[in-house]
Amino acid sequence: MRMMTMAKKTAKPDILIFGPKKPLIERGLAERFNVHIFHHPDDLAKLSPAQAQNIRGMAITNLVKADSAMLARFPKLEMIASFGVGYDHVDFRYAAEHNIVVTHTPDVLTDEVADTAIGLLIATLREFINADRYVREGRWPKQNYRLSPGSLRDRTVGIVGMGRIGQAIARRVAACDVPIVYHSRNPAAGVTFKHYPNLIEMATEVDTLIAITPGGASTAKMINADVLKALGPRGVLINVARGSVVDEDALIAALQDGTIMAAGLDVFAHEPNVPEAFFAMDNVVLLPHIASASVATRDAMDQLVVDNLLNWFSGKPALTPVPETPCGKGA
Ligand code: NAP
Ligand code: 8YV
């Protein structure tokens, strides 16, 4: 709700910081730039057309939809520094056409997200959340918690997406002595696990899917009713990718009718709103999109947003541009 625009006293480049409050980013950019800070989506309307005309850089999170209509307000925009590795919220085609470089925050979150995926997988299989509730409700003295039908011991994991994070997940799953295969459009360089170009074929061969692809049109609802059916009644789905990657209605039906056994979900189609149908299910573990959300990792992501903007506006190349937009050097 807070809106702050610092007075323009110098020829410092004008930067828009837009999204949930991020003190490290705000502090990191305050000295070098004339910053305009908006925390709430509706507040952007308060930026006058004259101010918008001067904006040359932008620091945003994935809660900000940077579509062509939004970006068209900023004719002098040179850089969109986005927080997070996924950038499905940015119209990078528009950016490329308008010579705007988009940066993201890869690598610094890879291990944290991979750790979360493994934690979520084991918590889902071994029912840690239900067991925790069991202890808190004082039920243990009356009866031991049930043996979990799920176990990592007898599984084969199919990783959907074998990029930076997929490979970090694979290293962890391999350390648990669990067989791994993967699906992506192309075989991943240097990866020796079996590659399935066809997701349904892979789902037929495994009992556990871990999704870690980008969001966006090419992956929309790729984990659908057919994939869940192929996964089968022992099937477990872990989604740390994007909610859009899974057909949520099909997943709810599959969990309700036993088409698959369980799911661990960090991401949802319409965050922060989660379908109520999940709340009644014992066979799901639900996280509020926290895969990268430790203080240390989020600080590193914030700092990379700052460093991309500082580099660019010191005439140096962007540090972590997305592959689809121009690189070059800043002004
Ligand atoms: P990355 O290195 O670019 O890897 C992406 C992988 O997905 C690649 O193996 C890619 O292979 C595959 N892929 C892309 N499009 C695909 C498609 N249409 N069908 C099948 N596979 C496809 O990215 P990363 O750093 O590992 O991050 C992956 C994603 O994880 C992010 O984009 C973000 O959405 C998500 N993420 C979520 C959280 C969270 O908090 N839950 C945190 C970080 C990241 P091909 O190009 O060969 O298909
Ligand atoms: C963040 C993410 O939780 O990096 C990503 O793609 O989804 C997460 O690390 C998200 O960007 C928070 O805004």
Image: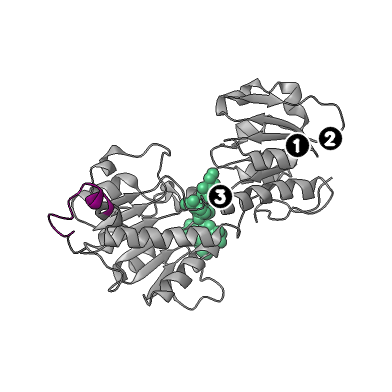
Relative horizontal placement of residue 17, taking residue 283 as reference (left or right): right
* Residue drawn at (24%, 64%) of the image: 150
Q: Earlier in the sequence, mark 2 or mark 3?
A: 2
Does residue 134 belong to the magenta stretch? Answer: yes
* Residue drawn at (41%, 63%) of the image: 118
Determine the CA span between mark 3 and mark 1: 21 Å
Tag 3 secondary structure: helix
Relative horizontal placement of residue 173, taking residue 257 as reference (left or right): right
Tag 1 secondary structure: helix
Percent across and percent down for residue 324 are: 65, 53
Residues shaded magenta = 132-145
Relative horizontal placement of residue 95, taking residue 32 as reference (left or right): left
Residue 30, numbered label: 1
Q: Earlier in the sequence, mark 3 or mark 1?
A: 1
Q: Which circle, 2 or 3, is nearer the viewer? A: 3
Q: Which residue is mark 2?
A: 12
Q: Main secondary structure of the magenta part?
A: loop
Residue 295, numbered label: 3
For the N terminus, the quadrant is top right
Name which residue type carries label 3.
Val
Name which residue type carries label 2.
Lys
Relative horizontal placement of residue 173, taking residue 301 as reference (left or right): left
Percent across and percent down for residue 307 are: 73, 50
Determine the CA span between mark 1 and mark 2: 10 Å
* Residue drawn at (47%, 53%) of the image: 291
Tag 2 secondary structure: loop
Name which residue type carries label 1.
Ala
Percent across and percent down for residue 23 are: 64, 39
Q: Quadrant of residue 26?
A: top right
